[in-house]
Image: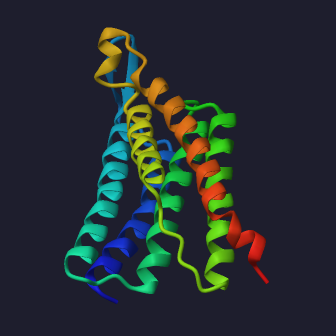
Amino acid sequence: MNIPNRITISRIFLIPIFIILLSIPFNWGSWSIGETALPVSHFVGALLFIIASTTDWIDGYYARKYNLVTNLGKFLDPLADKLLVSAALILLVELGLAPAWVVILIISREFAVTGLRLVAAGEGIVLAAGQMGKLKTVLQIISISALLLHNFPFSYIGFPFATIVLYLALIITVVSGYDYFKKNWHVMRDSK
């Protein structure tokens, strides 16, 4: 249990706090942003989500820099990412901030890729994330953060940044999933 793995586990432990914060209606008030209101709980939830997402970069950087990459870390890190992003996306649907069909497509892709990785792991093959997968994760994090912040600060000028980034994240998510399966189809084809 090295430091990068502890950081990853801390990200997993932040998820229930994040869920409770956005699921239970805390009456902390709201701030006026243009013509909409930003509930303080959404702002705090966005900060918590950003902090949790940042730990993904920190644990990966630390593990590579100090050669602390472990099989446990290879398993836990993508699991923590998928749990955090899935929880956030589902909460966005519940809060009325994201369309359900977009969230279903994104989460379905994540399950499909995880399934492929499990098949590969059963064959002793480790499938690394590609550049499109990393871009997908960045776009998902930016879109979730922007949606939780009710498009702040872009709401002041009427620019739908959060919506644009969400749909861009959806496109890259689907394309990267297709690319991932195309490049690694041999794992499914050759599995025992």
Front-lying residue, 12 or 117: 117
The residue that appears at 64% across and 36% down in the rendered structure is 102
The residue drawn where x is 35% and y is 79% is 5
Quarter occupied by residue 3? bottom left
Q: Position of residue 176 (x, y in %)?
A: 56, 48
Q: Please name the residue shown 42% across and 69% down the image.
A: 13
Q: Which one is in front, 155 or 182? A: 182
Q: Is residue 24 left or right of residue 192?
A: left
Q: Residue furthest left?
A: 66
Q: Of residues 4 and 145, which is closer to you in this image?
A: 4
Report x, y in % for residue 56.
34, 62
**Is residue 68 shown left or right of residue 112?**
left
Residue 138 sits above or below residue 30 on the image: below
Give the vertical position of 68 relative to 130 (above or below): below
* Quadrant for the N terminus in the image: bottom left
Residue drawn at point x = 25 percent, y = 65 percent: 58
For the C terminus, give its image quadrant.
bottom right
- Measured as percent of width and height from the top left, residue 19 is found at 49, 54
Q: Is residue 177 above or below residue 113?
A: above
Number of numbered discs overlaid on the protein picture: 0
Query: In the picture provided, is 16 more to the left or to the right than 138?
Result: right
Q: Could you say which quadrant of the image residue 42 lies in?
A: top left
Using the image, determine if residue 161 lies above or below residue 185: above
For the rendered model, the colour scheme is rainbow
Query: Seen from this angle, which residue lies furthest bottom?
Result: 1
- Residue 58 versus residue 157: which sits nearer the camera? 58
Residue 120: quadrant of the picture = bottom right
On the image, the x and y values in percent for residue 46 come to 36, 43
The reply, left or right, for residue 63 in relation to residue 92 is left
